[in-house]
Structure formats: C-alpha cells, structure tokens
Image: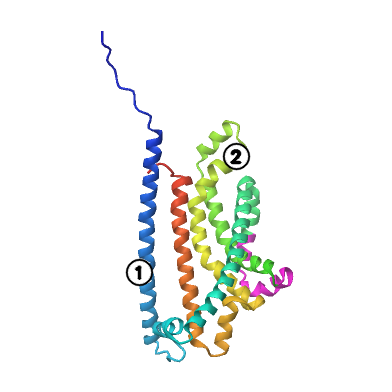
Amino acid sequence: MATTGARPAAPAGPRHEALSSASLAASLLRRTAVLLLTLVVSTAVLVAAWYLLLELLDVDPFVGKRPADVYEYLVRDEDAAANRGEILSLLATTLAHSTTGFVAGLAGALAVASLFTLVRPLEFAFMPLAMLLRSVPLVAMAPLIGSISGRGLAGAATIGGIVVFFPVLVNIALGLRSASPQAVDLVRVNGGSRLTALRKVALPSALPNLFAAVRISVPGAVIGAMLYEWLFSGTGLGAEIFRANSQVQYSKLWAIVVVVTFSTIVLYTLVSVLETLVLARWGPDAGRR
C-alpha cells in the first residue's frame, strides 16, 4: 500500500545564507547609491550657498574667494600641482591626528559607558560631572591639557579624544540602557554574568546609537585635531590655515577650508556605509529583513 505524506523540506541553510548575502549586498548597494547622491547634492548646495552668501554680504573678492578662485588655485594655476601637493600633505597630517583623537575618545567612551552599565550607581554619580566638564570650552582647557600631555601624540589624543568622548558616551550609555530587559533576564537565567549580558544583548542593541555618535564625532575629531595643531604642534592644516590668514594668502585659506569640508563629508559618508554593513550583520534587527 502506498503511503502518502508531506514531502520533506529540502535543507534551506545554504540557500538561505545565499539569499541573505544577496539581500545584504543589494541593500548595501542601494544605501551606497543614496549616500553618493546625497554627497553630490550636498556639494552642489554648499557651492550655491557659498556663492549666494558672498554676493548677499557683498564680500570683497580679495578676501572672500569664490569657488572658481579655489578651483583656479588647486587645478588651473601654474603652481596648482605644488599647491595641491602641499595641502594634501598637510591633510594627511591632520587626518593622522584626527584618527588618534577619534580612537582615543571612542575607546574611552565605550569603556566608561560599559562600566556605567555594569555598575549603575557610577553613572548617577559621574555622568553629571562629565556633562559639567563638557560645558567648559576646550580652548580654555587647552593650556592645562598641553602642560599635562605635552605636544606629541598624547596631546593630539587628549584634545581630539575630549571632543569625541562626551557625545559618544551619552549616546552609547543611552543605547546600552535600551537593551531588552527580557533578553537580559534570559541570559542571566541561563547562567550568564552581567558581562555576558552586556556583550550578547546590550552592545548589539547600542550599535545604532554608537554609529549615530560616530557620525556626529567625525567632524569633531577633525576640529579637535586642527585645534591641537594650531595651539601646540604647528603642523597640519590647523596651523597652516592661521599662517595663511596672517600672511594674507586668502586663496590658500579658502582652499584649506574646502578640502577640510569635503574630507569631512566623505568621512561621514564612509561611516554611513559602514553602519549599513555592520547593522545588517550584527545590529539588533539583523536577519529580520
């Protein structure tokens, strides 16, 4: 006698993984296209606003250089190659200082926010103090920071780290607190420690907040690096922009502003692309789309 019954389902593991990878790639491609379009539109808006503001404010062309003047300085002038080489070399120095400060601030904020999550009374005791310190202008603290950390790599890490630390700390602490209490209780019921719950539940839940803080902090890290260069090191774009102003080299000054602004926008865009990839793999909603 023939037996009837439902046909066993074929193993869907590899196929499911392939579909997930394809979906992730398509999502990343769409996100990248949107971000590139946003980059182009933002650049066009900035150039238009640049022209419009200088015209409305009737700024003397000798002082207020137009986009065409910067293009001439960097591309068409007979010394354009030398001008580009100098600014790009200074940009590399500034980006190195920015990276140092950014990594120091991010690592410090992650460590402190995790400690706040593991030992909650510490957050209530020290978060108001952190916000109070944040309200003090960095320029006012700079001489003290310089006398303590010096003019080397430690100084760059301290200045840039302070700019990055506070917004990242607030956002990550908020993200860690948003972890599902049921998921945390499940880890604890199965024998997991507070550290395990932090690693398995709270950190993935905080990833969106982390990347939001990183996007905010990228321009801050560049500004912190330029402040360090102006006050202490005498190198990079931070020092050169003040030299150009004092020497009435307005074409160079505006070119530096353009390069810094464009570099910051590009870094912001790269962080957004990385955010899409990381959240799709390890974020709180990974695998649900």
Residue picked out by circle 2: 196
In the displayed structure image, the side of residue 24 where residue 253 appears, left or right? right
Of badges 1 and 2, the one in the foreground is 1
Instruction: Give the residue at x 35% y 64%.
Output: 37
Q: Secondary structure at mark 2?
A: helix
Amino acid bearing label 1:
Val
Q: What is the CA distance from the residue labelled 1 to the residue labelled 2? A: 44 Å
Q: Residues within 10 Å of mark 1 (few under 14, many from 20)?
A: few
For the C terminus, the quadrant is: top left
Instruction: Please name the residue that numbered disc 1 is placed on.
Output: 41
| In the displayed structure image, the side of residue 156 where residue 67 appears, left or right | left
For badge 2, the amino acid type reads: Thr
Residue 160, above or below 195: below
When asked about the image quadrant of residue 56, the answer is: bottom left
State which quadrant residue 10 falls in: top left
State which tag comes first along the sequence, 1 or 2: 1
Location of residue 7 with respect to 277 vertically, above or below: above
- Residue most toward the top? 1
Name which residue lies at 39% across and 47% down.
24
Determine which quarter of the picture holds residue 195: top right
Task: Give the number of the disc on residue 141.
Answer: none
Which SS type dominates the magenta stretch? helix
State the residue at coordinates (28%, 12%): 3
- Magenta part of the chain: 129-150
The x, y position of residue 95, in whole percent, is 56, 69
